[in-house]
Image (spheres, helix red, strand yellow):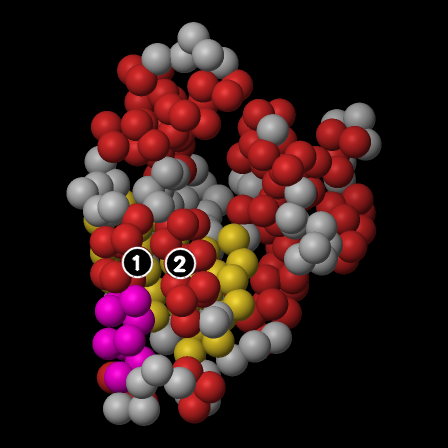
Amino acid sequence: MSKLKKIIEFKIAADGSSASGKTTGCYLISKKLKMRFLSSGLLYRYCALKILENNNFYNFKLINKISKSITLKKLNNKKLFTPEVAQLSSLIAKKPFVRKALKNFQKNFINSSKLVVVEGRDIGSKIMPKADLKLFFTCSVKEKAKRRLKEFKLINEKVTLKQVEKALIKRDNEDVKRKISPLIMVKNAVLVDTTKLSIKQMEVKLINLVRDSIKKKYGNL
């Protein structure tokens, strides 16, 4: 069971609400089990960054050009986490032509290895519908607000916990109700509630889930 190289193929798709721990959780899985990891939200952030550098102008032609220039190395950029980029990436993610342009990169990434974990919207429903394991992360709003408060403090020292909580509630409601790629728990996904889990506890829980799923598919390795 310890040698995943014996596995023919195993792919994980993950989604969940904002600040629910999905990115951290998937990173822990990839690091522990030597799987390739992609947080698809970075693709939209990269497009947003390039749009801002292009004086906020964008159309299908530009987005298509940007999507073809993306590399994993380019996604490792601190500029992708500025408030301006975050705000714009959330807006363009609702555009069908943007999602369509970025689909190829995600598909190519998934096909680049037999062991991958990808998190983000549409992954389990449209990008990787036949994933071996689908995870859906959730967490209480109060706990999510506590986690995000430190990040928001870097932007605005005066921000309060209640303000962060209000912003997260607004974001979750928008994600659930939006017409393009709404936040939903796809069929057969495993619910992972991280509200009361420490990082270590989350790692143990997720690794056990993955190993159990691998065992169901391949038996004892």
- Distance from Cα at disc 2 to Cα at disc 1: 6 Å
Which residue sits at x=74%, y=30%?
Answer: 52
Outermost residue toward the top in this view: 158
Magenta residues, start to end: 207-215
Q: Amino acid at mark 1?
A: Glu
Whether residue 144 is visible to the viewer of this picture, yes or no, is yes
Would you say 163 lies left or right of 155 here?
left
Q: Earlier in the sequence, mark 2 or mark 1?
A: 2
Which residue sits at x=40%, y=85%?
Answer: 3
Which residue sits at x=65%, y=63%?
Answer: 104
* 127 or 161, nearer to the observer: 161
The mark found on residue 203 in the picture is: 1
Total residue callouts: 2
* 116 or 201, nearer to the observer: 201
Would you say 9 lies left or right of 161 here?
right
* 206 or 93, nearer to the observer: 206
The mark found on residue 51 in the picture is: none
Q: Up-down: is 139 above or below 212? A: above
Spot occupied by residue 167 in the image (x, y as percentages of width and height): 38, 22
Residue 152: which quarter of the image?
Answer: top left
Mark 1, Cα crowd under 10 Å, few <14 / some 14-19 / many 20+, is: some
Is 208 within the magenta?
Answer: yes
Q: Which residue is mark 2?
A: 28
Spot occupied by residue 10 in the image (x, y as percentages of width and height): 42, 78
Spot occupied by residue 77 in the image (x, y as percentages of width and height): 67, 43
Circles 2 and 1 in contact, beta carbons < 8 Å: yes
Would you say 42 lies left or right of 1 here?
right
Element class at badge 1: helix
Residue 131: which quarter of the image?
Answer: bottom left
Is 146 within the magenta?
Answer: no
Q: Amino acid at mark 2?
A: Leu
Whether residue 67 is visible to the viewer of this picture, yes or no, is no
